[in-house]
């Protein structure tokens, strides 16, 4: 009997780190910036139109209202998805990510593993835990549609694995 394979693709550590940190950078921007609400103009403006009907109707006020709502909702949903993915991590992984990336300040790695954590850990342990947290977050963010996991696959190891299976 063959066992079902649940092989997840092996992710490239450097690509994964860059992608996850990019998501957290976007998260910080969305959390800490205010969207400038667009407003409809009430002053008439001249537009040169060709003669004859264009069969196009426009409602600029409705377009602006929809844009204002959807931009705000998109930002809120993105932030919620990031927070949900982080909340599902193992406690030690979650602590590292929350202290380093989700706080108001962006501390250095040294400050996180030496001073901010409840129980300080070594640099190597911190790097190992953060790498595993990033791997888990990559799969979660892929499930939420935030990143594409295929762009993070380690092609060198994937090629070795397929050639050894032949």
Image (cartoon, grey):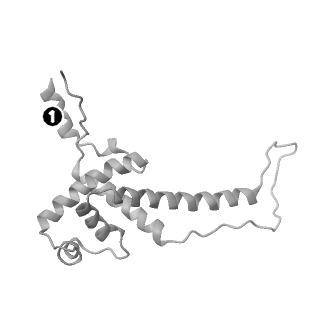
Q: Answer with the quarter of the image where residue 104 lies.
A: bottom left
In this picture, residue 40 sits left or right of residue 157: right
Q: Position of residue 120 (x, y in %)?
A: 16, 73
Quadrant of the drawing holding the N terminus: top left
Who is closer to the viewer here, 33 or 42? 33
| Label 1 neighbour load within 10 Å: few <14, some 14-19, many 20+ | few
> Helix, strand, or loop for circle 1?
helix
In this picture, residue 134 sits left or right of residue 53: left
Please, is residue 100 above or below residue 65 in the view?
below
Who is closer to the viewer here, 91 or 24? 91
Q: What residue is drawn where x is 24% and y is 29%?
A: 4
Q: Position of residue 157 (x, y in %)?
A: 17, 39
Question: What residue occupies the far bottom of the structure in this picture?
Answer: 115
Q: Mark 1 points at which residue?
A: 160
Please, is residue 26 above or below residue 165 in the view?
below
In this picture, residue 79 sits left or right of residue 140: right
Question: What residue occupies the far right of the structure in this picture?
Answer: 52
Quadrant of the drawing holding the C terminus: top left
Q: Answer with the quarter of the image where residue 155 lies.
A: top left
Q: Answer with the quarter of the image where residue 66 lies.
A: bottom right
Q: Position of residue 33 (x, y in %)?
A: 50, 71
Q: What residue is drawn where x is 69% and y is 60%?
A: 64
Question: What residue occupies the far front of the structure in this picture?
Answer: 1
Q: Position of residue 165 (x, y in %)?
A: 15, 26
Q: What residue is drawn where x is 17% and y is 76%?
A: 114
């Amino acid at each position: 009997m063959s066992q079902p394979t649940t092989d997840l693709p092996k992710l490239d550590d450097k690509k994964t780190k860059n992608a996850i940190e990019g998501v957290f950078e976007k998260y910080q921007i969305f959390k800490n910036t205010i969207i400038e609400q667009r407003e409809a103009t009430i002053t008439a403006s001249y537009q040169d139109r060709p003669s004859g009907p264009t069969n196009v109707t426009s409602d600029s006020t409705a377009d602006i209202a929809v844009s204002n709502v959807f931009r705000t909702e998109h930002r809120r949903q993105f932030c919620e998805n990031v927070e949900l993915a982080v909340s599902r991590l193992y406690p030690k992984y979650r602590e590292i990510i929350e202290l380093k990336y989700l706080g108001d300040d962006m501390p250095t790695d040294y400050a996180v593993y030496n001073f901010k954590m409840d129980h300080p850990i070594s640099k190597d342990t911190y790097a190992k835990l953060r790498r595993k947290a990033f791997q888990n977050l990559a799969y979660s963010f892929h499930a939420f549609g935030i990143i594409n996991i295929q762009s993070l696959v380690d092609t060198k190891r994937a090629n070795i694995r397929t050639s050894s299976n032949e």
